[in-house]
């Protein structure tokens, strides 16, 4: 029996997606997503803990991210956990764990381009939730 590698996150974008267009027409987007959880310390004070996640989106999802996603926006991400290695500028081997997105949904409101709402205090405009999915490649199909 095969294992399950599935990650589901709801959080806020830490920065606008960085998108690269590769040879052959493929696109890849990288961005960070912040998730928060809360707990009470020994004194009973509520403490917020933020966890940062590296997200990678390919092809159509990368193009969607480039077009629609902005820093601070709340999104839902579903994907797979992957760890890869690379050589840094000092030729040291580094490892990074990231979520490779299969689905991204925009939640809540969308920040306006100038960061100001109609009341001038950064309010968000309501937007209908949109979901985008990465279609599997032919070699990823289970049959």
Image (cartoon, rainbow, N blue to C red):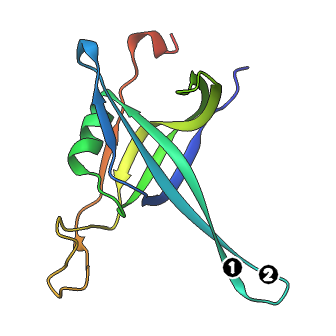
In the current view of this chain or complex, which residue is farthest to the right?
Answer: 42
Point out residue 12 in the picture as x, y percentages from the top left corner: 43, 61
What residue is shown at x 52% (from left), y 15% (from top)? 142
Residues under labels 1 and 2: Cα distance?
7 Å
Which of the labelled discs sits on residue 47, or is there none? 1
The answer to which quarter of the image holds residue 65 is top left
The answer to whether residue 117 is above or below residue 4 is below
78 to the left or right of 115: right
Which of the labelled discs sits on residue 139, or is there none? none
Point out residue 125 in the picture as x, y percentages from the top left corner: 21, 73
The reply to whether callout 1 and callout 2 are in contact (CB within 8 Å) is yes
Q: Residue 74 versus residue 89: which sits nearer the camera?
A: 89
Q: Residue 117 versus residue 80: which sits nearer the camera?
A: 117
Q: Label 2, secondary structure: give it.
A: loop
Point out residue 39 in the picture as x, y percentages from the top left corner: 72, 76
46 to the left or right of 91: right
What residue is shown at x 25% (from left), y 43% (from top)? 66
The answer to whether residue 81 is above or below residue 123 is above
What residue is shown at x 30% (from left), y 30% (from top)? 20
Point out residue 118 in the picture as x, y percentages from the top left corner: 14, 83
Q: Residue 91 versus residue 41: which sits nearer the camera?
A: 91
- Please identify the quadrant where the N terminus is shown: top right
Q: Residue 137 versus residue 113: which sits nearer the camera?
A: 113
The answer to which quarter of the image holds residue 42 is bottom right
In the current view of this chain or complex, which residue is farthest to the left?
Answer: 118
128 to the left or right of 17: left
The answer to whether residue 137 is above or below residue 108 is above
Crowd rating for badge 1 (residues with CA inside 10 Å; few <14, some 14–19, many 20+): few
Question: For mark 2, what is the residue?
Answer: 41
Q: Label 1, secondary structure: give it.
A: strand
N-terminal-most mark, 1 or 2? 2
Crowd rating for badge 2 (residues with CA inside 10 Å; few <14, some 14–19, many 20+): few
């Amino acid at each position: 029996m095969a294992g399950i590698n599935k990650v589901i996150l709801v959080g806020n974008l830490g920065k606008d997606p960085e998108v690269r267009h590769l040879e052959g027409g493929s696109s890849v987007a990288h961005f960070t997503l912040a998730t928060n959880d809360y707990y009470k310390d020994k004194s009973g004070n509520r403490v917020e803990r933020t966890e940062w996640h590296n997200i990678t989106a390919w092809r159509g999802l990368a193009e969607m991210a480039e077009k629609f996603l902005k820093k601070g926006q709340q999104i839902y991400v579903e994907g797979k956990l992957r760890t890869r290695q690379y050589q840094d500028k000092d030729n040291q081997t580094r490892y990074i764990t990231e979520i490779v997105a299969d689905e991204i949904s925009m939640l809540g409101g969308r920040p306006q381009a100038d960061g100001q709402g109609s009341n001038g205090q950064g309010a968000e405009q309501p937007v209908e939730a949109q979901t985008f999915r990465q279609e599997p490649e032919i070699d990823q199909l289970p049959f």
